Amino acid sequence: MRLKVTSRKFIKELERRRGEFASKRLAARITVPEGLEYRWWYFQEMGTATHNPDSPNSSGYNIHPVTGEVLAWTNPDGSRIVVPFVGFPYTAVHPGVPAQRYIAEIEPTINLAVGSMVGKTLTSSKFDFNALHDALLTEIMPEVKRQIVESMATKLTGTREDGKLLGRAAADVFNEITTIEEV
């Protein structure tokens, strides 16, 4: 579609707005705290299986046996977990975590919601960058996080009292520990 615009005032205003937006940065992200225990969220989305065709279990990954009679580690509460047999066939192949895709599956829905919210903010604020900036941090990203939490609540339903989440639902913990930050 082509428009022929003859109003110099209109063209000047478009150029001003383009310049205003081009000189500013607008970005935010949902952040999970640092630490090995929080990589769990990534593993749930992406999975951990290596899909090595040479492996006896191509949907898993090999754990190479160590020399020793037992494999053991100490829990934070001081108790010990002992695996009495190390190596094939007991611990040689670990099945891996299948990808749950709790974010990838809802990405089109997220994109529609974000597009709609950005459009409404721009038109209601008369294309004010600061209004869009504020909406990103206080409305848009919280909506993205809400949709992710809702997806997690339906995809990641299991709980274990002795697991990383101590019996709590994955969605509840994710909602509690993640933050939205400006990039």
Image (cartoon, grey):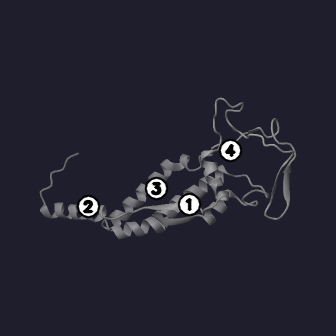
Instruction: Say whether residue 102 is left or right of residue 86.
Output: left
Q: Which residue position is annotated with label 4?
A: 97
Cα distance between the residues tagged 2 and 3:
24 Å
37 on left or right of 10: right
Residue 18 disc label: 2
Residue 171 position within the rendered picture, expressed as x and y whole percent measured from the top left? 65, 58
Q: Residue at x 21, y 61 (%)?
A: 15
Q: Residues within 10 Å of mark 3 (few under 14, many from 20)?
A: some
Q: What number is the disc on residue 146?
A: 1
- What is the quadrant of the N terminus in the image? top left
Please identify the quarter of the rendering in which residue 5 is found.
bottom left
The residues tagged by marks 1 and 4 sit, at their Cα atoms, a distance apart of 24 Å
Q: Nearer the viewer, mark 2 or mark 4?
A: 4
Residue 113 disc label: 3
Cα distance between the residues tagged 4 and 3: 30 Å
Spot occupied by residue 140 in the image (x, y as percentages of width and height):
46, 62
Amino acid type of the residue that numbered disc 4 sits on in the rendered structure: Val
Instruction: Report the Cα–Cα distance between label 1 and label 2.
Output: 31 Å
Q: Nearer the observer, disc 1 or disc 4?
A: 4
Dot 2 lies on which element?
Answer: helix
Amino acid under disc 1: Arg
Tags 4 and 3 touching, CB below 8 Å: no
Describe the element under mark 4 as helix, strand or loop: loop
